[in-house]
Image: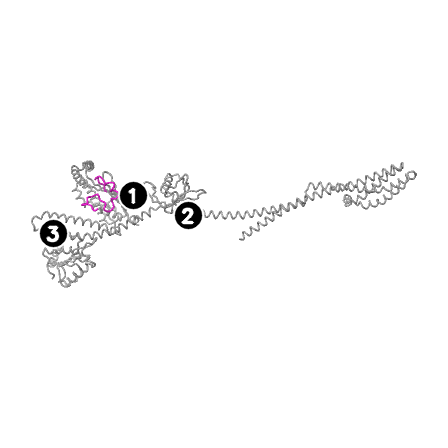
Amino acid sequence: MILSRNRRSLGLLKIGLVVASVALFLATALVYVSQTRQQAFLTATIRSSGWVAYQAQLEFVKAQAEFAKLSIVPSAQGLHALMLRLEILRSRLPLLYDSDEGRVLSDVVDTRGPTQIFEARLDQIIDDVARLDPEEGAAAEELKALSAELEPLGEALQTILMQSVAYNQEIFRRERALAQRPGATPLLLLFISGACLAAVLILQSRRDRIRLGEIGEAQAALAAVEENLRAVIQAVPACVVVIDPDTDHVSFFNPSAATLVSPSLDDPAWPRFVKAVRGAAGEPETRRWGALSMGYVRSPGDIVSLRGSVGSVLWERRQQQLIVVVDTSRVRNAELQVMQAAKLATLGEMATAIAHELNQPLAVIKMAVANARRLLEPLPGGEPVAAKLERISAQVDRAKRITDQVRRYGRMPTETLLPFSLRHAVELAAGFVAEQFRAANIALSIETSAPSELLVFGEQTMFEQVIVNVLINARDAYEGQDDGEAARLATDRQGEAGDRESGAGDRESGAGDRESGAGDREVRVSIGLEEGRAVVLVQDNAGGVPPEMLERLFEPFATTKSTEKGTGLGLSLARSVIRDMNGTIVAENRGGGACFAINLPTTQANAAQDAA
Amino acid sequence: MNTARTMLICDDEEELANELGEYFTSLGWRVELSVTAENAIGHLRRGLAPQVLITDLRIGAVDGRQVVAEARALPEALRPAIIIIITGHVMHNVAAADFDSDFLYVKPVDPNDILDDIAAGLAKRATREG
C-alpha cells in the first residue's frame, strides 16, 4: 500500500520533472534566440550610430572646405553652395541625439550638449552667410571669421566620432568574446534542464532498483518454491519419471525411480521401462491414480507390481509426459498372504470340523463292521462276506488316515521355535522309512557337508514328518511307475479290444517310462550350509513330477498318487511346517527325477528376524 | 462293589451307542445305554454302579467330563472300575489322564481294541488290589 503510494508519487514527480525539463529547454531556446536577435539589433544600431557621427563629421569637413574656397574668391554661387552645405550640416546635428542611432550614441558620449550649443550658432552663421554680399571686399574676411566660429563644432564632432569608434570597437571586442563563450543564462537553463533530466534518470533508476528488488524477491521466492517442490519430488517414495512424448527419451527421474529402474540414463533398462509403461497405459492419458497397473520385470525373476498414472505435464517449458508409479509388490504380496492365510485358516477350521463330523459315521461303521464280523463268524460259507467286511474296515482306516492328516493340517502353528540338530532329525526321519525303502528296493543315502551340531529352529517331530513325507513321496514315485505300467497294460488290453490308436499311444509312452525307470532306484538326501542357511536336498531318479503338477505341488489336495495312497495334504502340510520354521521348500525336476530343496535359518536371530 | 461285566455307555450318537452296546452285549456284558449326559448321570446316582463307563466327550451341549466327574465322585462301591472316553474331537498331545479317564480313543475306534484295553485294565487292577 505504502509502496504503491510511493510509486505513484515518484511517477508524478518524474512526469513533473520531465515537463519542467522540456519547458526549461524550450525557454532556453527562446532566450537564446531572443538574445541573439537583440544583440544583432543592438550591433546594427551601434554600427549605425557610428555612421551618424561620421556623416556629421563629413558634412562639417565639406562645409569648412566650402568656407575655404569662398574666402579666396567669394561668389554668389559659392555662397549658395555654402549655405546648402551648412543646412545639411545643421540637419545632421539633431540626428546625433534625436534618432535611434543617436540615442544609442548618447548613452556613450554626451551628444546633445555640445551639439545643441552649435545648433543655434550654426543657425546664426547661416543667417550671416545669407546676408553676405560677394561683391563686398569684406566678404572674404567675414567668411574666415564665420569659419573660425564654426571650428569648435568640428572638434566636438571629432570627439563624438572618435568615442563612437572606440565604443564600436569595444562592442565588437565584446561580441567576439561572447561569440567564443556562450551566454550564462542559457547555460544555466541548460544546466537546470540537464539537472532535471538527471533527476529524472536518478528517480527512474531508483524506481528500477525498487522494481528489481521486487523482482529479485519474487524470483527468490519462486526459487524457494521450486527448491521445495524439487525436494518433495526427490524425496517422495513414488517413482517419478518425465519422458519426452516424441522420442520417449527420459528427461527426469527421481531417486525412487533410479532405485526401481536404473541410476544411469544410458541404461537400456530405461527404454524397456518406458515401453512397458506405454504398453500398460494403453490410453494416452491415464491421469486417474491407479489407472496404470502393470508388472515390470526388473531382472529375470524379479517382477514388481506397479500402480500409478501417466499424464501430460509442462516440464522445462515443453509438454512432456509424467509417469508416477508406486511399487505395490509388497502390498500386493501382503494382501495375497493375508488372503491366503485367511483362506487357509478358514479351510483349516472347515477341514477340522469335517474331520470331526466324518469320524462319527466312521466310528459307527467301524463298530457295525465289528458286530457284523462277529455275527458272521458262526455261519458257514461266510468267507466272501468276511473279506468284504475286511475291505470295509480297511477303507474306514483309510478314511481315518485322511481325517488325521486333515486334523494335523488344521493344527495351530507353534509359537516358540526350539533348536534341534538338523542332521539328527533327518537321520531319524530316514530311519522311519528305511524298511519301506529296502522293501521297494530303493537305495537311500544321506550325505552331509554340514556339522552334526548344526541347529535349526522349529518343532522337531513336525520337521521329521516333513522329511518322512518327502521320502515317502519319492518311494511312491517309483511305485507309481509300477502302477502306471500295470495300468497301461490293462489299457493296452482294452485298446486291443477297442480303440487301437489310443492303445498304441499308451504303449509308446509306457516304453519311454520303462526306460527312465530302468536304472537303479536311488534317493539321495544331502545336508549342507549355503550362505549361513541350512539346505536339505532330497533327490530321486523316479522320472520327476509332471510339469503341470509342479506348480501346484504344495497346494492342498494336489496329488499324483492314486486315491488309495495320497490325501494330497502331505506336501501342503510340509510347506506349512517349513514356513513356520521361517524356511522355504521348493521342488524341481532334475537329474532324472524330482528334487526337493528345504532352506532353513540356522540361528535364533535369523529365525526370529524372518518371523518378524 | 460294582457288578462285573456291566457297562454304561453314554453317547449322543445313538447308532454308535447301539453298535457299541450290541458288541459288548453279544460278549456277555450287561450294557446300559444313555444318549444324554443327564440320563447317564441319573443312572450313576441311582446306583447303577457299572464296572465300565464309556462316554463321549461332547454329549449334545454337555461336556462328557461332567459325567466322568460324577462317576469319580461316587462312593468307592458305586464307582466304575474303568472309565473310557471316546471322542471325535481333533486333539493333539492329549492323554487319557488329562480327562481323568483310564483310556482315551479318537473315533473311529475298533471295539476289539476297547475290549482288549478293558481286559488289560481290569487285570492290572486285580493285580494291584490282589
Q: Is residue B1 left or right of residue A4?
A: left
Tell me, yes or no, whether the highlighted magenta stretch contains residue A585: no
Q: Is residue A130 left or right of residue A366?
A: right
Q: Report in which chain the residue with disc 2 lies.
A: A
Identify which amino acid the numbered label 2 is placed on: Val
Question: Horizontal and vertical percent for residue A211?
Answer: 53, 48
**Residue A239 visible here:** no
Q: Which residue is mark 2?
A: A232
Say what secondary structure mark 2 lies in.
Answer: helix
Badge 2: residue crowd in 10 Å (few <14, some 14–19, many ≥20): few
Left or right: B65, with A268 as reference point: left
Q: Which quadrant of the figure has residue B47? A: bottom left
Locate residue A181, reporting x and y percent.
68, 42
- The numbered disc on residue A531 is 1
Looking at marks 2 and 1 on the same chain, the residue that comes earlier in the sequence is marked by 2
Residue type indicated by callout 1: Glu
Front of the two marks 3 and 2: 3
Q: Main secondary structure of the magenta part?
A: loop
The residue identified by callout 3 is A372
Task: Report the span colored magenta.
Answer: A538-567
Are the residues tagged 3 and 2 within 8 Å (C-beta)? no
